[in-house]
Amino acid sequence: MTRLMTAASVAAMLASASPLLAQTTMNLAFTPPAESHYGDAGRAFAERIADLSDGAFEVSLRPAGALGGERDVIEGLQIGTVELTISSTGPIGNFVPEVYALDFPFLFKDYDSAHQILDGEIGQELLAKFEPHGIIGLAWAENGFRHITNSIRPIREPADMAGLKLRTMENEVHIAAFRAAGAAPTPMSWTEVLTSLQQGTIDGQENPIPIVTANNMWEIQKNISLTGHVYSPAVVAMSKIHWDNLTEEQQGWFVEAAQAAAAASRATVAENEASGIALMKENGMDVVEDVDKAAFAAAVQPAYDEFADRYAPELIQRIKDAQK
Ligand code: EAX
């Protein structure tokens, strides 16, 4: 009996020792491949949290849709089956309506404007809107300005999209915008896009250059048109269930790690933007650089008319005013 007691007392002692001995592993899910802007962000997060917690927290990256599409993962955060994610805001408006304001077409002028607004009052206000929905918005990372790829024809103006079966994110503003511009929009999770393009059930899709290059999309898409029609933020988010189990100090660690992830994503996007056009051309893509952006902006205006009043119209006006 004595020997068992000794073992039990040693076990109890270890368990009650500094929490740093008891390592907690958390999943961080995203849909792009491991070698991508989201992967760089995830690695930055994992390194920073391991450093700040002295190894008490380990983050396991789950790239390439391993835990499902972005909607699935957000639902996972809400019920606690997934701890962390880096996700485009595209589908998030379905959970946090105010976030729809960020995905309106031709709203952000350029990367600097987007960074200033997201890192300022407006962006921080929006992160706070997540918590009532069981999600903690930790920081604004970056997906990038979105462009249209397809395998049917070069697209220079909206008329070139007539009838094109174009995948969009599960975002009703994007669906309305592409329908108004003459395409045939098909919303679907990213996890189905590459197969759908290979099978020809869709003709094209729209995503930032980092997504195109990380997925070698020149293998399945002939054309890319640099429309830059939407600036796509990516949020670093955590399940509130898991957040609430942290001490205040530990919560601070997760915010700091998310900020490191955000900075890493922006750095990789800047790199990918600088080298991506040449890389796509080298791999045989026809890159249309002289897109008629004004014509696209006019063509998608009905999406503003239909949805701006529904999704925090004052927020859209504040974002526009902040860029004057
Ligand atoms: O977040 O679904 C999309 O097109 C997103 O841009 C992608 O999953 C990265």
Image: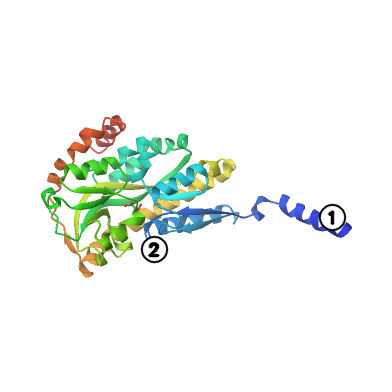
Horizontal arrangement in the rendering, residue 110 relative to residue 160 (left or right): right
Instruction: Look at the picture and state if 155 lies above or below 100.
Output: below
Instruction: Look at the picture and state if 239 lies above or below 285.
Output: above
- Residue lying at the far right in this picture: please name it: 2
Q: Label 1 belongs to which residue?
A: 5
Horizontal arrangement in the rendering, residue 42 relative to residue 275 (left or right): right
Q: Position of residue 34 (x, y in %)?
A: 41, 62
Q: Position of residue 240 (x, y in %)?
A: 51, 41
Do the residues bearing badges 2 and 1 touch, measured as CB atoms within 8 Å? no
Identified at 12% across, 52% down, the residue is: 160
Q: Amino acid at mark 2?
A: Glu
Q: Label 2 belongs to which residue?
A: 35
2 vs 1, front mark: 1
Front-most of residues 90 and 81: 81
Instruction: Look at the picture and state if 276 lies above or below 111.
Output: below
Instruction: Look at the picture and state if 266 lies above or below 251.
Output: below
Q: Position of residue 289 (x, y in %)?
A: 16, 57
Q: Secondary structure at mark 2?
A: loop
Circle nearer the N terminus (2, 1) = 1
